[in-house]
Image (cartoon, grey):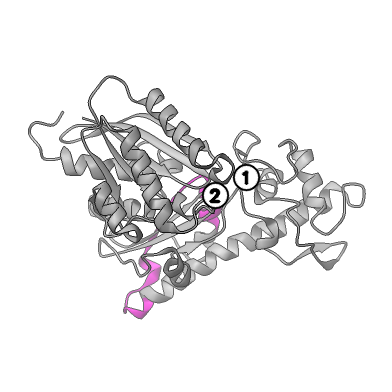
């Protein structure tokens, strides 16, 4: 049984193709592509999904499982419009799939009509695919108590697992931002001015200008946390992705340039921004730990499970938050699916629905 899992975001599209058997799953292909929906628009999304289908779907029978966050894009006036467009477009393009399911906030797959009728149940619900997967497999991994931290290009998703169950308090984006289950910072696209309001320079702290002069991708590139090839988004000035060009952009943050400060000073600015971003994730982890403690449980016994292209950031935040055991999701799944984990989890939901424990599967 072939399943295509998609995570359709406003900045990235993530795709996985898996083959399901009764007792195992094989990952056949993975795609993670930067796709700024606010630039390409509705027609661009249609063309991209058609391209994905042509490139990944062969002549075999297949199923599709979809989660989304793209409905938040400002190409849509409201989320209802976004969900309806994405659902109808997906159903039209993958019209020869045996079944198409959309991930819902109750950690189930719903039909296209159900998704449209109850649009807030599927809006921004890629976290629900991850939560479902963690619930299903936590006992098998002997990890009944954990906090999952998935950091991508733009956001951080946090999911507390308590006694093998996802203990979700926020079901919409505003709710999740409130309870610490969503942090709007990532390792590529975030504007530096959304992370700090001052930086250290020449033995003093200087205020910074509220301009889009540098992105967090520049910070991580200069510090060696990512490579130029991993810097998949556009840059703030439209120029290249070398370390030197990233330093030029960082130097502009305090209204300076590369002739006004040396490379050591620029790296210290980058270090300060990096530590400030770690603190943003640390704060969310501490908020969730305080919730766990309020239930009469000891957060120090919980493990941290990390995923996403920003695993390095998740690890540092988890260390600062006091986690003694930090586990990479790739190590326990056994496949390199970390960067597209919600898409993989969505595919697994369809495998569960249609294949697992089915004698006719595989």
Residue 324 in magenta? no
Instruction: State the extent of the magenta-drawn residues as a range.
Output: 293-316
Q: Which residue is mark 1?
A: 225
Residue 358 seen: yes
Q: Which residue is mark 2?
A: 312
Q: CA distance from mark 1 to mark 2?
A: 7 Å
Q: Is residue 32 above or below residue 203?
A: above
Q: Earlier in the sequence, mark 1 or mark 2?
A: 1
Dot 2 alpha-carbon crowd within 10 angstroms: few under 14, some 14 to 19, many 20 or more:
some
Q: Secondary structure at mark 2?
A: helix
Q: Are marks 1 and 2 in contact (CB under 8 Å)?
A: yes
Q: Position of residue 294 (x, y in %)?
A: 36, 80
Q: Residue furthest top?
A: 59
Judge left or right: residue 87 versus residue 21. Answer: right
**The C terminus appears in which quarter of the rendering?**
top left
Front-most of residues 292 and 233: 233
**Quadrant in the picture for residue 360:** top left
């Amino acid at each position: 049984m072939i399943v295509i899992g998609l995570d359709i975001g406003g900045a990235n599209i993530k795709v996985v193709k898996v083959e399901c058997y009764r007792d195992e799953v094989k990952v056949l292909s993975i795609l993670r592509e930067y796709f700024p929906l606010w630039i390409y628009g509705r027609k661009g999304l249609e063309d991209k999904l058609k391209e994905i289908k042509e490139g990944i779907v062969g002549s075999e029978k297949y199923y599709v499982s979809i989660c989304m966050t793209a409905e938040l894009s400002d190409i849509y006036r409201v989320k209802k419009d976004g969900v309806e467009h994405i659902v109808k477009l997906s159903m039209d393009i993958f019209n020869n799939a045996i079944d198409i399911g959309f991930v819902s906030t109750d950690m189930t797959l719903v039909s296209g009509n159900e998704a449209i009728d109850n649009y807030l149940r599927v809006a921004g619900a890629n976290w629900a695919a991850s939560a479902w997967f963690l619930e299903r497999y936590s006992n098998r991994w002997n990890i009944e108590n954990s906090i999952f931290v998935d950091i991508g290009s733009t956001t951080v998703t946090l999911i507390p697992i308590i006694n093998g169950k996802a203990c979700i308090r926020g079901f919409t984006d505003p709710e999740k931002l409130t309870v610490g289950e969503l942090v709007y910072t990532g390792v590529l696209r975030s504007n530096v001015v959304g992370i700090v309001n001052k930086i250290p320079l020449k033995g003093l702290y200087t205020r910074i200008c509220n301009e889009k002069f540098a992105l967090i991708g520049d910070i991580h590139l200069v510090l060696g946390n990512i490579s130029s090839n991993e810097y998949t988004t556009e840059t703030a000035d439209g120029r290249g992705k070398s370390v030197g060009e990233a330093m030029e952009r960082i130097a502009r943050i305090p209204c300076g340039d590369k002739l006004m400060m040396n490379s050591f000073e620029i790296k210290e600015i980058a270090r300060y921004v990096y530590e400030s971003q770690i603190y943003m994730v640390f704060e969310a982890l501490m908020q969730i730990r305080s919730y766990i403690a309020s239930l009469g449980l000891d957060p120090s016994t919980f493990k941290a499970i990390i995923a996403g292209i920003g695993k390095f950031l998740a690890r540092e935040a988890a260390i600062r938050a006091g986690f003694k055991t930090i586990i990479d999701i790739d190590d326990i799944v056994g496949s390199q699916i970390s960067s597209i984990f919600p898409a993989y989890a969505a595919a697994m939901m369809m495998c569960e629905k249609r294949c697992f424990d089915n004698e006719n599967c595989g």
